[in-house]
Image (cartoon, grey):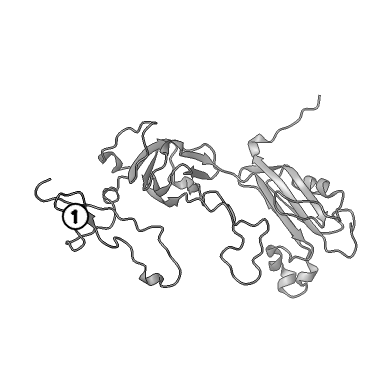
Amino acid sequence: MQGYNDLVLLSETVGLQNYGAFYEKDSAGFKGQIKLTGFRKGDIDLSESLWTYQVGLKGEFLKIYTIDENEKAGWTDLTVGAIPSTFSWYKTYFDAPAGTDPVALYLGSMEKGQTWVNGHHIGRYWTKVAPKDGCQRTCDYRGAYNSEKCTTNCGKPTQIWYHVPRSWLQTMKNLLVIFEETGGNPFEISIKSHSTQVICAKVSEAHYPPLQMWSHPDFVNGKISTGNMIPEIHLQCDDGHTIASIEFASYGTPGGSCQKFSMGNCHAPISLAVVSQACQGRTNCSIVISNAVFGGDPCHGTVKTLAVEARCVPSSNIGFSALQ
C-alpha cells in the first residue's frame, strides 16, 4: 500500500541449541539481511531500518487461556476439514474422567506449542520424533561417556502424554486452551485417566533389607546389623486398585526385566503359589527373600533372587465365583 506500512514478524526462540562449544555466541532472532522483493525499482533492504520488539503474544497478554478472559477473544468454530495453520489458538471444553486415577492429555496429533487447563499452564509440548536408528537392545552405561549410550524410543515421539493434576479439574466443562506454533490436528486430542496395570519387583537375598527395618530399635542400638536382617520384596498397586493376578514369579536365578522376566537354571517350583497366596486380592504385599519361604534351597551355593510381575485392576473389577 502507498504510504506508511507496518511490517510485523514473529520470532520463535524455543528449541535452539543449548549446549556445545561457543554456545554463548549463538544468537537468536533475525540473522542476515531482511529484504522486500518484487518491486520494479529493485529490492528494498530493511536490515538497517529501525526495529522494535515485544516479548510474548497478544493472547498471552490478554490471558485468553483463563476461564474469566477467554470469552473476550474472537473465537470461531473449527471445522473438521480445516487445514492446520501455524501460530493458532484453539479451545474446547471437556468433562473430567470419572474416578480418582491420574489424568493425562494426549497431544500426539499436535506438533509444538503450549497448553492450559482451566487457566493452569501445563507447559510446552513438542512431539519431536526421535531418529529411527541408534537404539540398543541392551543398556550399559559403563565406561566413558557417550551421548549415544542407552538411547530408547527410536522412531517415536519424545513425549505425547501430559499429566493434568486432578486438583485443577472440575466435574464438567473444563477449559482446554492450546497455542500451536507449527500445525497439528486438534480433533485427535483426547483426555484419559491412567493407572498402573503392571508392577514388578526383583530382589536378591544379597540386597539390603527394607529401609523401614533400619529404624528398628535393635538395629539403632547396635544389637543387630544389616547382615542379620532378611531382604523383602514389596508390591503395591495404585490407590483403589488391587493385585488381580501374578503373571510371573520365580525364586532362584531368574533373568530379564519387567514384563520380560524368564526362569533361570535355578527355580523353586512353588514360587508362583507362594507369591499368589501372599499378594493376590490385596492392594499391597511383602514377601521375605528366604529359602524357608520357598520350600528349601533350590540351588545350594548360589545367590537366589525373587522376580515378580503382577497385574493390578480397579478394586471394583475383582470378580467372585459362586459355588453351586
Count of marks placed on residues: 1
Q: Image height check: is 302 above or below 132?
A: below
Q: Image height check: is 214 above or below 193?
A: below
Tell which residue pokes out farthest to the top in this image.
324
Q: Residue at x 36, y 36 (%)?
A: 83
Q: Image height check: is 215 above or below 164?
A: below
Horizontally, residue 318 falls left or right of residue 170, namely right
Horizontally, residue 137 falls left or right of residue 17, namely right
**Label 1: how many Cα within 10 Å (few below 14, some 14–19, many 20+):** few
Residue denoted by label 1: 43
Where does the C terminus fall, quadrant-wise? top right
Per the image, label 1 sits on a secondary structure element best described as loop
Front one among 37 and 58: 37
Q: Residue at x 37, y 39 (%)?
A: 84
Find residue 162 and report its horizontal and vertical position in percent: 49, 48
Residue 66 in view of the camera: no
Find residue 288 and report its horizontal and vertical position in percent: 79, 57
Quarter of the figure with residue 242: top right
Find residue 175 and report its horizontal and vertical position in percent: 38, 40
Quarter of the figure with residue 208: bottom right
Residue 177 in view of the camera: yes
Find residue 231 and report its horizontal and vertical position in percent: 76, 62
Q: Residue at x 19, y 59 (%)?
A: 46
Quarter of the figure with residue 89: top left
Horizontally, residue 149 falls left or right of residue 2, namely right
Tell which residue pokes out farthest to the left in this image.
3
Where does the N terminus fall, quadrant-wise? top left
Horizontally, residue 255 falls left or right of residue 138, namely right
The three-letter amino acid code for the residue at tag 1 is: Asp
Front one among 264 and 305: 264
